[in-house]
Amino acid sequence: MITLEQLQAGIVIPVDKPRQWTSFQAVNKIKSVVRNTYGLKKFKIGHAGTLDPLATGLLLVCVGKATKTIPQLQDGDKVYTGTMVFGATTPCYDLERPIDHYFPYEHITPELLNETVRQFTGTIQQVPPMFSAVKIDGQRAYEYARLDDPTATIQPKTVTVYSFEITDFRKPETPDTLRTSHLPPLTSHLSPSTKNLYQNPLGEVPPHLPQADFRIHCGKGTYIRSLARDLGLALGSGAFLSALRREKVGDYSVDQAINPDEIQQYLTSSQPTMD
């Protein structure tokens, strides 16, 4: 069992954040369990790097004096896997918002894709998404995005992408009659029931769009949603994320992580990960 003394000395809890959970919810879950388990009213707790609600994977939650290591942990390299969808965009570059535009995609091949991703390795300039926690004049960018404020802009930032690998490419599953060149705007071609599914931010991806799985090893501050957007533009199309999973942060791996519902068992039966 992790003792109160060990907890206060500082532990890092690797959590496998579920889909649709915010990072704040995951921290709050652990905070509640720690408070009830140890009878603490006040203690330090925080996480090292936000994961978007629709992303899953490794979230490092620091308790006690381990919170002092948060900046160091955030500086660590990250590894992400996931899926990008081509031929369409969403305002937030993932499925939290419905598709807003369709684009041609017939010219996208595995060969073109593998060639184009090379543009996004090394030290590159990247504009973070408006639907993000980046600050603009002291306010979070997502606050401007929700107000649809056209005057708000985010400055490009320098990030490092060590590798960007396409691990699978899947062609559209529907007949040629549903190819992009024949599609009316947005989802007007779909039946009412199907249209509702696709307009749902958590709905499935329209099956006529091609998809690719990827693995990215990158430095701190890299937005994978922005890489998807920029890759779509470079391909002469559009793109967004339909799935994202953080596999590694520095020396920590998601293989070490626990589900938030297992926190009680972790605290009472495991050995701590000490700083």
Image (spheres, rainbow, N blue to C red):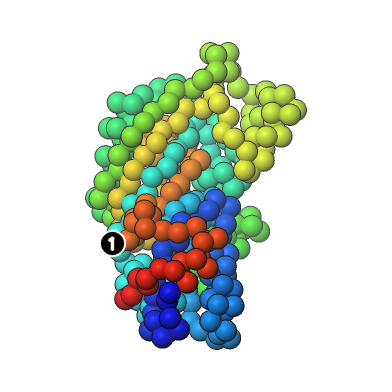
> Looking at the image, which is closer to me, 191 or 61?
61
Residue 136 seen by the camera: no
User: Residue 245: x, y in percent?
Assistant: 43, 49
Q: Which residue is drawn at 44% across and 53% down?
A: 57
Q: Is residue 161 above or below residue 234?
A: below
* Left or right: 98, with 141 as reference point: right
Numbered-mark total: 1
Q: Residue at x 58, y 18 (%)?
A: 178
> Looking at the image, which is closer to me, 174 or 261?
261
> Looking at the image, which is closer to me, 204 or 124?
204
Q: Which amino acid does label 1 sit on?
A: Asp
Kindly indicate the quadrant of the structure image that contains residue 118: top left
> Looking at the image, which is closer to me, 97 or 230?
97
Q: Residue at x 45, y 38 (%)?
A: 84
Residue 13 seen by the camera: yes
Disc 1, SS: loop
User: Residue 165: x, y in percent?
Assistant: 30, 39
Question: Residue most toward the right?
Answer: 192
User: Residue 22: x, y in percent?
Assistant: 56, 60
Q: Residue at x 57, y 84 (%)?
A: 39
* Left or right: 264, with 146 as reference point: left
Tell me the quarter of the image containing the C terminus: bottom left
Tell me the quarter of the image containing the N terminus: bottom left
Q: Is residue 39 above or below residue 22?
A: below
Number of residues whose C-alpha sits closer than 10 Å to that of mark 1, classed few (under 14), some (14–19) or many (20 or more): few
User: Residue 77: x, y in percent?
Assistant: 30, 59
Q: Name the residue under label 1.
A: 251
Q: Is residue 248 above or below residue 187?
A: below
